Amino acid sequence: MRMDTEHQGNNFPPYFYLAASIIVAIIMIGVSLYFRPLLPIDETRYASVAWEMWHGGDWLVPHKNGLPYAHKPPVLFWLINLSWMIFGVNDFATRMIVPLVACGNFFLIYQLGKRLYGKHSQAAEFSPLVLLSFATLALYLPMSFFDMLLTVFLLSAVICLLKSAQENKIKWGAVAGFWAGIGVLVKGPVILAYLFPLFVSYPYWRQDGWLSNRKWLVGCLLSIIMTAVVALLWAIPAAMQGGEEYAQAIFWGQTAGRVSESFAHARPFYWYVLFLPVLTLPWLFFLGCWRSRIFSQLSQADKFCLSWLVLTVLLFSCFSGKQPHYLLPVFPAMAVFLAAKLNLKLFGKEPLLALLLLILAIAMFSGPWWIGAAFKAAQNPEVHPFWGLVPLFLAVVAIKPAVFQKFRLPVLMLAVPVSIYALLPFVSPVIFQLYDLSELAQQLKKKQTEGHVVAISGNYHGQYQYLGRLEEPLVVIGDKNTEEYLWLAQHPNAWAVIATRNVDTYIEQHAVQIWPYRGRKNVLISAADLFQWPDWKLYTPVIDQKLTEKKVAVNSELE
């Protein structure tokens, strides 16, 4: 049976907080799209992979800079292409589709709360608002990343598993596997790592009358089989079309290879625990949360949420490769639990929250004095400090219960995410100056249209393909090594992009244009001029020797 929890101070219609959460989330997405560019290297890379899918017409095998891209499955790129089919190829269509689909998480967590705690429970109605209140989740929501998209299919699978347990119908395990299979096509088999804690902890949170432990395991096995079937419907034809190397990458690299490689990226086991104050922001600052004694008198539904959350954190802590957004798919467990356990009547004055908001407001008001030191690569950095009024006003709300009395609770919960979004217009001029690569990408497009070969020095992450709507791959040459200089010597009519901290007089005189970028300078320069750069004179004897060897080899072949 499910637990129907009583409301505590909720005078709004049942769908109010769900609707409010979605509306606020869409506003946040709009603010993000307007006040920042596509951020390199991840967002620009994924947009470029989608662009090459659109331009090349290959929907099975994603490509990056003309080569098969096996690092991620295709669903995100399919969604962007679907958006382009409807709205055309433009930045709005590129950037809005994934966040809008991710907004489905608010509806799904509402359904999860109903299934766990009852149709009209506090957990169901408040959980969408609590989910949006997490600053980390709100920050990643507008980004074209995989994690929030993965959460949509993970929650769909979890709801189906719960339905299977509650209704004693194993067939719902197969439906859960279907959604999990699509999740595999979003970000690979990692979705099973989020489901595994629920598979093994079922006896701990199982309720009377639910599916037996044995049948639950059968349902889980059925779910895993269906997950594999759905994933293979794409993987097998993609492997056949992409070739042996691509096949090995998607079958090995997306499974055991990804796990084994993670151990090479050292982050300690306890890293997520140390990061919890940031991940759970702002809830550690709510006195009402501490007063609610949320860990007392745990129900079976509470145990479900805690098992899912704690075991997932422990499992992901075992892998060295750790990032904050890796835990986003399990945030719904924390949100439903908090929504169920909070005593809403205990949220009065919130001085800790007010202090946090006041510090943020002071930082924004004083921005003109410190922004230059924080962003040294920016030229005459500009900020808009009046946006500090947003966290300042919310700080007043936090310590004055009479202000916004009727809407006080949602305003308090969203105070930190809203203040963080006020940071975007505050620092927007600097963000565009340092991270907007569209002007450089358009220059590369112009050079390619004129018939020139364009090369890029160092590692290339595909950041220019979409922004410039490039129709030809860039030539990737080494970074200050012999092969790079040989290429420059052999292609004097080509153009090259380099990223350097050393912009001397020679570069200033010969570069077409120079753009600041993340502490360095992006330089567009002809290959002939770059080859003569005095900074590389030390390598000239090596280049001459290599060129001589190459000429001898060519003459030998002709003879």
Image (spheres, rainbow, N blue to C red):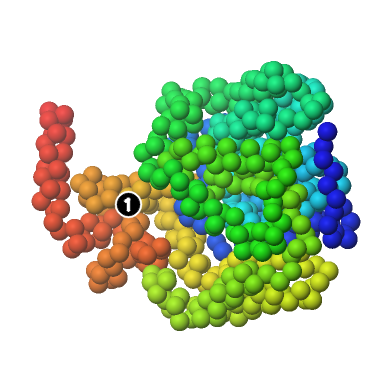
Please name whichever residue, 376 or 485, is drawn nearer the observer in this view of the structure: 376
The image quadrant of residue 33 is bottom right
Residue at 59% x, 47% y is 328
The residue under label 1 is 457
The image quadrant of residue 305 is top right
Please name whichever residue, 24 or 249, is drawn nearer the observer in this view of the structure: 24
Q: Estimate the x, y position of residue 551 in percent, counting from the top left.
A: 14, 39
Left or right of 378, for residue 295: right
Left or right of 516, for residue 202: right
Residue at 12% x, 39% y is 549
Quadrant occupied by the N terminus: top right
> Measured along the vertical axis of the image, is residue 523 above or below residue 41?
below
Residue at 59% x, 50% y is 144
Local SS, label 1: strand
Left or right of 540, for residue 267: right
Please name whichever residue, 463 or 148, is drawn nearer the observer in this view of the structure: 148
Q: In this orientation, does residue 425 appear?
A: no
> Measured along the vertical axis of the image, is residue 289 above or below residue 194?
below
> Measured along the vertical axis of the image, is residue 492 above or below residue 393?
above
Quadrant occupied by the C terminus: top left
Question: Which kind of residue does numbered mark 1 sit on?
Answer: Ser
> Measured along the vertical axis of the image, is residue 508 above or below residue 111?
below
Please name whichever residue, 161 or 479, is drawn nearer the observer in this view of the structure: 161
Q: Estimate the x, y position of residue 493 in percent, counting from the top left.
A: 30, 54
Residue at 66% x, 23% y is 220
Left or right of 539, for residue 441: right
Q: Estimate the x, y position of residue 112 in percent, counting from the top left.
A: 76, 41
Q: Estimate the x, y position of residue 73 in percent, counting from the top left.
A: 55, 35
Q: In this orientation, does residue 556 appear?
A: yes
